[in-house]
Image: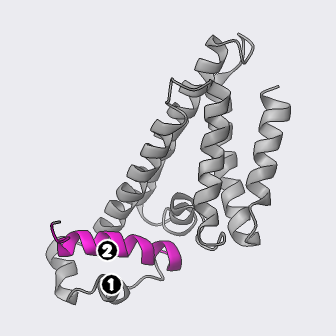
Amino acid sequence: MARASNREKILHEGLRVVHAHGFAGASVRDIVQAAGVPQGSFTNHFASKEAFGLEVIDLYFANSCESMRQTLLNDDLPPLQRLGDHIDASRNRLMRNNMRTGCLFGNFTAEASGDNEAIRAKLLDIFAETQRAYAYCLRAAVKAGELREDFDCEETAAFIVASVQGANLMAKAQRDPAPVERFKKFLFTTILR
């Protein structure tokens, strides 16, 4: 097996550090120490901490895309089951650290999108892509007869993205998955009924 490059180590360990301590709270020194590489390795591979942050977001999104492929975009499963499975998978990821780290996208949105236009734009792209995946799944549910024909898939997908992010933040604050579970229950018993 090939050894991970310093760049890969910095990205993967840096993702863990940023997720645990926040973007501002994770110093370059903390990141390279976690990666076990010299401090100069950071500047050799990343033009700035912002450039590093953008790549960390991409790495986290790659994992999210895989989850969306297995759930929301998986045409082999009934559409509303896919939607429920996706919410459950997201909740399960949050529970790995007892809800302490939350969703990296929500964390970056709350922390860094106010003064960093590149990070804000990246997050908006990610939320738009996620919304498209939800809308695809909802349109499949309409086509399968699981939702009525006049169901507003686009607006509901936008609502789900915003609501999931809010539920994730509340779950992080409460260190309890109840907000995510409450959202899912309300979604399925009221909005998708």
Q: Which residues are magenta?
A: 2-23
Residue at image coords 34%, 61%: 54
Residue 161 disc label: none
In this orientation, which residue lies closer to the viewer: 162 or 184? 184
Residue at image coords 60%, 42%: 86
29 sits to left or right of 24: left
- Give yes or no for residue 159 being in the magenta stretch: no
> What's the amino acid at mark 1?
Val
> What's the amino acid at mark 2?
Lys
- Secondary structure predominantly adopted by residues drawn in magenta: helix
Residue 114 visible somewhere in the drawing: yes
- Of all residues, the one furthest to the front in this rendering is 1
Residue at image coords 29%, 85%: 32
> Disc 2 or disc 1, which is closer to the eye?
1
Q: In this picture, is 89 found above or below 157? A: below
**Which comes sooner in the sequence, label 2 or label 1?**
1
Q: Where in the figure is residue 6, as x and y percent of width and height? A: 19, 76
- Give yes or no for residue 15 being in the magenta stretch: yes
Q: Using the numbered discs, state the Cα–Cα distance from disc 2 to disc 1 in whole angstroms.
A: 8 Å
* Residue at the spot of label 2: 49
Residue 28 disc label: 1
Question: Label 2 crowding class (10 Å Cα cut-off): few <14, some 14-19, many 20+?
Answer: some
Q: Where in the figure is residue 44, as x and y percent of width and height? A: 14, 77
Q: Splitting the image into 4 quarters, where does residue 85 fall?
A: top right
Question: Label 1 crowding class (10 Å Cα cut-off): few <14, some 14-19, many 20+?
Answer: many
Question: Do labels 2 and 1 touch, CB within 8 Å?
Answer: yes
171 sits to left or right of 70: right
In this orientation, which residue lies closer to the viewer: 136 or 53? 136
Q: Secondary structure under badge 1?
A: helix
Q: Where in the figure is residue 117, as x and y percent of width and height? A: 41, 58
